[in-house]
Image (cartoon, rainbow, N blue to C red):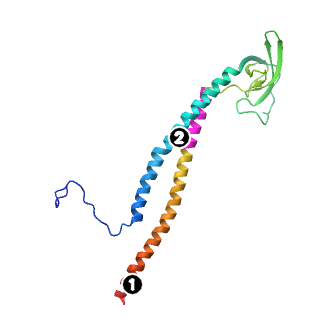
Amino acid sequence: MDIRTGSHRPRRRHNPLRRRSDVVEAWVVVVVAVLLCVVAPLTGTVAGLFTYDRVRTHAEEQRAERQPVRAVVAGRPASRPPAHGDRGHGYRAEVRWTEPGRGTRTALADVRAGTRAGDTVTVWFDRRGRIVAPPPNAVAVWQHTVGIGLGVTGGTAAIVLLARAVERRVALRHRLAEWERDWTRTGPAWTRRRA
């Protein structure tokens, strides 16, 4: 409570040193804080939820289209992964399995590192009978979702910070021009007193 006026509201004092650009700068800081603390995480969350739904649906479609077969590694896996191999299934080895009505079949398949001849592995086939990568599991779906969400959040924050840097440069130029105009008006009064 202000004792002199009896009012509970704080008095607004006009500060002669506060310029319009200072007020704009203060509001820009508030807007940037809201964009960084609320909007960026919100866009990341929305992108993550959208991605989760799409990737989960895609994984379910792949599980419906692909069929797993248990096979035995017949040959020794290659000592080096091929250039196109993915992280977990980078080594090629000959695998053998029995298919009802077609007898024993063999093929080259990607196997995990450390697999030896005689080990049992799961090989995935598409509807045409081609060996394909396994469908993404729940962990892979969540990893992709979190990666996209964090990427969108970081990208949004980077755009906000870049826009803030551009705004600061423009505001600085404007402020310097404002000071120059004010000094042109008040400078002669200061220099005359000394003379």
| Quadrant in which residue 109 is drawn | top right
Q: Amino acid at mark 2?
A: Gly
- Asked if the residue under mark 2 is in contact with the one under mark 1, i.e. CB atoms within 8 Å, the reply is no
Task: Quickly name the residue at label 1.
Answer: 188
Label 2: which secondary element = helix
Outermost residue on the bottom side: it is: 195
Figure check: 22 above or below 102: below
Q: How many marks?
A: 2
- Residue 115 bears which disc, if any? none
Q: Is residue 42 left or right of residue 189?
A: right
* Left or right of 105, for residue 126: left
Q: Of helix, strand and loop, which mostly describes the magenta segment?
A: helix
Rendered view: 184 above or below 172: below
Expressed as whole percent of the image width and height from the top left, the position of residue 147 reads 59, 38
On the image, the x and y values in percent for residue 68 come to 71, 18
Q: Residue at x 19, y 56 (%)?
A: 7
Q: Quadrant of the C terminus?
A: bottom left
Residue at mark 2: 44
Q: Earlier in the sequence, mark 1 or mark 2?
A: 2
Q: Which residue is at 20% across, 53% downward? A: 8
Pinpoint residue 113: horizontal percent, then vertical percent. 73, 28
Which region is colored magenta?
Answer: 138-152
Q: Is residue 105 left or right of residue 194?
A: right
| Point 53% across, 55% down: residue | 163
The magenta stretch spans residue 145: yes
Inspect the image, locate mark 1, and give the three-letter code of the amino acid beneath it.
Answer: Pro
195 part of magenta stretch: no
Look at the numbered disc 1 and give the secondary structure of its residue: helix
